[in-house]
Image: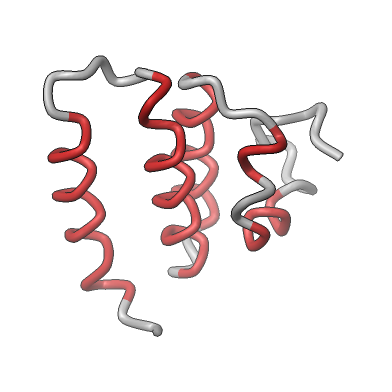
Amino acid sequence: QGRHAEAEPMMTAGFRLKRGELPEHDPSLKDAYLAWADVKLRAKDAAGAIERMRHAVRCGAKADDVAWYPELAALRNRPDYPLRSSP
């Protein structure tokens, strides 16, 4: 609801808790990275959203996973979009 400055520290802390002792690119983290990408994009930080999407892809995220976050479709035209094979 426009409170992006508050959301970022909460996402950082929540991600740290979710990750725990898991490796940075554990498959169970892909949805957390995609949710974080969504928050970044809503905060008008497209580069930050792309970076979180790259992490999600390293965790095994595919176009079907990204489709759960329709706002991320706005990033498809960027040359650095990490899912080139996405529809």
**Residue 6 percent across, percent down from the top left:** 21, 72
- Specify whether 4 is left or right of 43: left
The residue sitting at 41% across, 40% down in the picture is: 33
Q: Quadrant of residue 15?
A: top left
- Give the colour scheme of this rendering: secondary structure
Q: Which quadrant holds residue 80?
A: top right
The answer to whether residue 54 is above or below residue 67 is above
Q: How far from the left and from the top, in percent, is residue 40?
A: 43, 58
Question: Residue drawn 72% across and 54% down?
Answer: 73
- Residue 8 position in % (x across, y down): 26, 60
Nearer to the camera, 61 or 9: 61
Please identify the quadrant where the N terminus is shown: bottom left
**Position in image of residue 50 (x %, y %):** 54, 42
Horizontal side, residue 61 vs residue 20: left or right = right
* Location of residue 39 with respect to 76 vertically, above or below: below
Task: State whether residue 44 is above or below residue 2.
Answer: above
Residue at the limit of the structure toward the right, as seen here = 87
72 displayed left or right of 6: right
Q: Quadrant of residue 22?
A: top left
Please tell me how many numbered marks the rendered image carries.
0
Instruction: Work out which quarter of the rendered image holds the C terminus and state it.
Output: top right
Q: Residue at x 29, y 20 (%)?
A: 24
